[in-house]
Amino acid sequence: MRLFIAEKPSLAQAIAHGLGHMSKRNGYIECGNDIVTWCFGHILQQYDPEDYDKNLHAWRLEDLPIIPEHWKNKVSSSAKEQYEVIKSLVAKADCIVNAGDPDREGQLLVDEVLNQLGVLNQKPVQRILLNALDEKSVKTALADIRDNRDFVGLRNSALARQRADWLIGMNLTRMYTIRSQKAGYAGTISVGRVQTPTTALVVRRELEIRDFKPKDYYLLQVDWTHSNGVIPTTWKPQKQTEGQDEEGRLIKRDPAEQLAEEIRQEPGVVESVEQKKGQSQPKLPYSLSSLQIDAGKIYGYSPQEVLDTQQSLYEKKLTTYPRSDCDYLPTNQLADVPLVLKSLRELTDNLAQMVENADPALRSRAWNDKKISAHHAIIPTTITPEWDRLNEREQNLYTLVAKAYLAQFYPPQTFLSTKIQIRCAGESFHASGKVILDDGWKQLYHGSLEEKEGDDHPETKLPAVKQGDAVSCQESRIQTRTTKPPARYNASTLLKAMKEIGKYVKDASLKATLKDCSGIGTEATRAGIIETIQKRGFVSATRQKNLIPTEKGYLLLRILSDSITYPDITARWEQSLDAISRKEMRLQDFFQEQSRFVQQLLEEAKSCEIPPPKDVVRCPKCGSPMMRRWTTKNGKKSYFWGCSKYPECKTTLPDRNGKPVFEEMRYHPKKKQGKTNAGPFRYKKPTE
């Protein structure tokens, strides 16, 4: 008997349809001699510290670092019944097929179940890679089942990420929470491999904005008369001119006024003319990140909204795997082109016209087998959507994906660019123009929101001139401009920064090294990380959906080491994970490196100064910060304030509406009732 273990029920259902002869059972589907069962994502959880040692339930500095000798997992309480189903089926199976999603997390979540059951290396295990859930894609994947051992590197990279997250999160969260509580801060200071440098991006951007001092600068613009028309130019000083700043901007108006007067009296000459044809290749199909960025700019959708919507389209079998980090397509997908185009033609009039003008014989740069790993770009499937049954968000995102796919069957946009340089009064004046020769793929976006969000310069026509032609000043004007601070992040631009993390390293020498880095986080987790740092109170969103740091966010940057707040080491981790995936780095070497790194960070944390909060409550007896704590009696919580120097100082104050009541101060309570958190701190386990 062959057993398929899918990542989720929807994936199991698609596989079962592909196999045929379906007969549903409790927790699995029989398909002739095959059986398909499923997980619910990760049905195993890593041990908490207290699972390894019950004494670690209390948070104490002397217990750090916590580094497990042997890593263990436990079954999630919500998945115990399904785990037992899988366990019984695995015992009967002759061959097992890992049907996790085609990425490192999908590889791990099935492999870890097989490892927990002790059969990963005891029974034959195969791997199926599904990038889409339509019947044709499923049957193609079923005909190309591979050996699961080929994906050991992928699994180990996910395992490395999972355990590195645990080491950083458990140890540093405990360290900084205990120390910040002693300084008078309430709550947990959660530290994470990805969430912390992401938070730091927002905080540092806000500090840049706060420190920014706007400066006025001036542009001298001159229109020149030529026999064939007017040439609009801008003065670009060729050498250091009095009144320029270090970036070459003219911060004094006098030189511009003086030059404007001089050129009225002198003739000018066309010093050089440069013309060349250029091309703009069709945009690549979407990866998840590029789709999240575009959808954020065009429609204001959050990254999580885009991911959720694409997951819905995927489960409806309308688009391919949503968590793809790839924006290229394999050549074997060319066989589906006529079917996909036929499907798109049957939707809206707009898409039908786009299909009509497409040339299926064209091959864009997107068709590149060398760029494909576990999955390919997000594209429409051969299934025609029931358009009216899709909600507005689904229609918008499907259309974005469809247009990017159709662009591959349009020619490049071609244009003629012209650069003219005019010389007068010893200074140079520059003009640039662009004439579109053939719109090519850009015609797909005319009049659309996508075109408005584009970065292309508008078409600018210049008169025909040649070197040596005489010109004269028709008009000059001095424009005053003001430098602007950097823009605040929103969810989409922060996601882009996470993907392009090499731009934000502290060590400039790493920029070249990290140019091709895949960023921090993954396609599947970045949206969740942005939501997490908001839920944990490090950043908040304005009405304009911009992200700004909270007091807790500023504290995080103030007290944490640069080693964890800057992305340098985090980006290197991602490179290490890629190396593990390619079997170029051993899992054990990575763990040893991370264990040393955690110990280094803990040592740095011990010596950092944590200033008390502005509204700190001081102990009336010893002057130390006081903390709001709770006790339980008969299952009910009641709050009080206790000195952070406990047990050296046992001063307590009653709590009234979250504030201490000093007039009812009491010292050294003789009797303790119920359970209390007045001693070592106990908090909910942090997760990345």
Image (cartoon, rainbow, N blue to C red):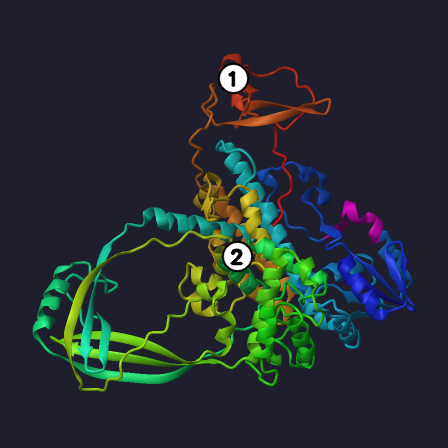
Q: Is residue 453 above or below residue 64?
A: below
Of residue 411 and residue 687, the one placed in the foreground of this image is 411
Q: Which mark is residue 299?
A: 2
- 314 on left or right of 435: right
- Near mark 1 (Cα within 10 A), the count class, few <14, some 14-19 or many ≥20, is some
In the picture, which quadrant includes the N terminus? bottom right
The amino acid type found where label 2 is placed reads Tyr
Q: Which residue is mark 1?
A: 661
Q: Is residue 55 above or below residue 638?
A: below
Which quarter of the figure has residue 17?
bottom right
The amino acid type found where label 1 is placed reads Val
Question: How many numbered markers are drawn?
Answer: 2
Q: Which mark is residue 445?
A: none
Position of residue 39 measured from the top left corner of the image (x, y, whole percent):
78, 56
Q: Given contact means CB atoms under 8 Å apart, are the residues at marks 2 and 1 in contact? A: no
Position of residue 569 measured from the top left corner of the image (x, y, whole percent):
50, 59
Which residues fall within the magenta stretch?
72-83
* Extreme residue toward the left, this view: 265
What is the secondary structure assignment of the residue under circle 1?
Answer: loop
* Extreme residue toward the front, this view: 349
Q: Is residue 80 magenta?
A: yes
Q: Residue at x 52, y 54 (%)?
A: 300
